[in-house]
Every structure is written in structure tokens, then in C-alpha cells.
Amino acid sequence: MEICDKDLWHYTTILMEHFVKYLRYLKFPFSPEVFLHYRSAIGFFLIVVILSFVIDFFLSHSFLGSKYRFFLAPGVIIHEMSHGFACIFTGAKVSEMALFEKDGGHVKHTRPRIPVIGPAIISLAPLIAGILIIYLTSKYLNSAEYNPFNKGYGVNSLLEANINFAKNLLHLSIRNWILLYIVISVAVTMTPSRQDFSNAFFPLLFLMLIFLIVSKLTHILLPVSSFNLLLLSVINLLILMLVLSIIVFVISNFFLGAKT
């Protein structure tokens, strides 16, 4: 049985409707219906974040340890370089950049010259760059051997497409193996770190408030269908990576006796 968007987000909608009623009760100066319009995008984004952290947990607690990040080198490099370019864009000076360390890479920088949104841009730069790179590389993958939505957008269709893809892995061209590796490495590492979220929380809250007020005054809502589809593609890749990370974790801890 196919699970459509309405079924998938049924309970989310109920919760958001109660939230909308509460906002109306508080008489906020913007239309609370905007939250309902973007509920799918918010939900998909949260799923991407959760999957990335879960994958990081399983791989870091396997025999690979923190060295697993070397296997995801393209994604790690893009993550840290995105922070660096965002610093330059916002007027912050980069004092130190490390790509591969035991606890992950980092970028040390001065305070950005752009107030409020500067820290948010720097913190979310890997996510923005990751989505853009996945979009560009997926266009080549989708035009060739890999298209997770060629049988529809339901759960069963997605599962069938992934099974067929797994059966045909040996028949992939070298180019598409490379593209798939890049997409997966970027998808796993593009999520902002805990420190990034901490730095961006209040600026994002402020930007969301401004956006909602502008939406109320101008009645403009950005289309999110394409963004949702892209996030769904990322989720699909992360699920495949999650299965692989669980297998590595189980082998490490139950057969090889790796220390976690």
C-alpha cells in the first residue's frame, strides 16, 4: 500500500494545527498557516539531521572509529571549505582550518561583519553547499543508472527502486560509481555540527520571524515542492548509508569485538 504525503504527515499536521491555534490565541503579527505550508520541508530537514547523527554514531563506534571520516573525505573537505568561504563572504577572518582531526574538522574565525545573519550563514554553509552539490551530481545520476523515483514516490516504490539499484551495482559505470560516492559522502557530512546549530539557533529564529512577517504582508510563499523532492533524495541516500553503517557496527562489536 502506497503511503502518500497526507498519510505520512497526518500526525504532524494535527500537532501543527494545534500549534496554529495557539499562535492565533497569542495574536502573533503573522499568518501561522505558513507553518502548515512548510511542515513537510521542516519534517524532511529534521529527518536528514537525525539520520546524519545516527550514521555518525554507528560508524564512529565501529572498528573504523573516527578514521571513517577519511572514507568520506570529499564530504568532509566540502563541509569545512564551505565554512571557510562563508567566513570570507560575511567578512570574518579565518585564523585556523583543520580538515581531519580525531573529533572532526574545524574552522576558527573572527566575528563576521554582517550582524545577526552572519553566524547563521557560516554555520549553515555546509548544508547549503551540500544540497547544491547533491542537486548537481544527482542530475547526472538520475539521467543514467540511478533514479530512486522512477517508479513513483511511495514507500513501496522507493523500496523497489533501491532493491533494483542494489542488484545492478556491479553494472554501474565507473563515472557513476564516483558520482554516487561523492553524493553519499556529502549527504552524510553536510549536516551542521552541534556547535554550528548552537551558533545559528537565535539568528535563524530571528530570520524565521522576519520571513513570516514578510509572508504575511506580501502574501508570498516560496515554492517548496522541488526542495522537498531534493530532501527526499538525500533521505533515500542516507537510509542506504545507514544500513551500511549498521552492518559495519554489528560486525565490529559482535564479531570483531571493537572497542566503542
Image (cartoon, rainbow, N blue to C red):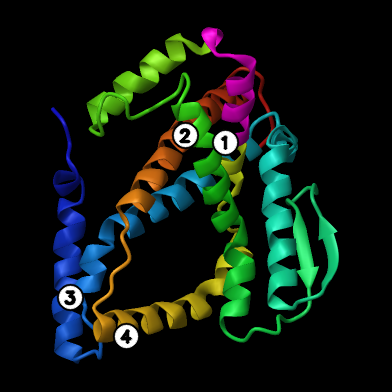
Q: Amino acid at mark 1?
A: Val
- Residue 122 is one of the magenta-drawn residues: no
Q: Position of residue 155 (x, y in %)?
A: 25, 31
In space, the residues marked 2 and 1 are separated at their CA atoms by: 8 Å
Local packing at callout 2 (Cα closer than 10 Å; few below 14, some 14-19, many 20+) is many
Q: Are marks 2 and 1 in contact (CB under 8 Å)?
A: yes
Q: Earlier in the sequence, mark 2 or mark 1?
A: 1
- Report which residue position mark 3 lands on: 20
Q: Position of residue 146 (x, y in %)?
A: 45, 23
- Pointers 4 and 1 in contact (CB under 8 A)? no
- N-terminal-most mark, 3 or 2: 3
Q: Where is mark 1, residue-wise?
A: 183
Instruction: Give the residue number, with chain letter if any, for mark 4.
Output: 213
Determine the residue positioned at 14% across, 88% down.
25
Does 75 sit left or right of 110 as displayed?
Answer: left
Q: Is residue 10 left or right of residue 69?
A: left
Residue 223 in which image quadrant: bottom left
Q: Where does the image place residue 21, in percent across and percent down from the top left?
A: 13, 78
Q: Earlier in the sequence, mark 3 or mark 4?
A: 3
Q: Is residue 67 above or below residue 107?
A: above
Stretch in magenta: 170-182
Residue drawn 76% across and 59% down? Answer: 106
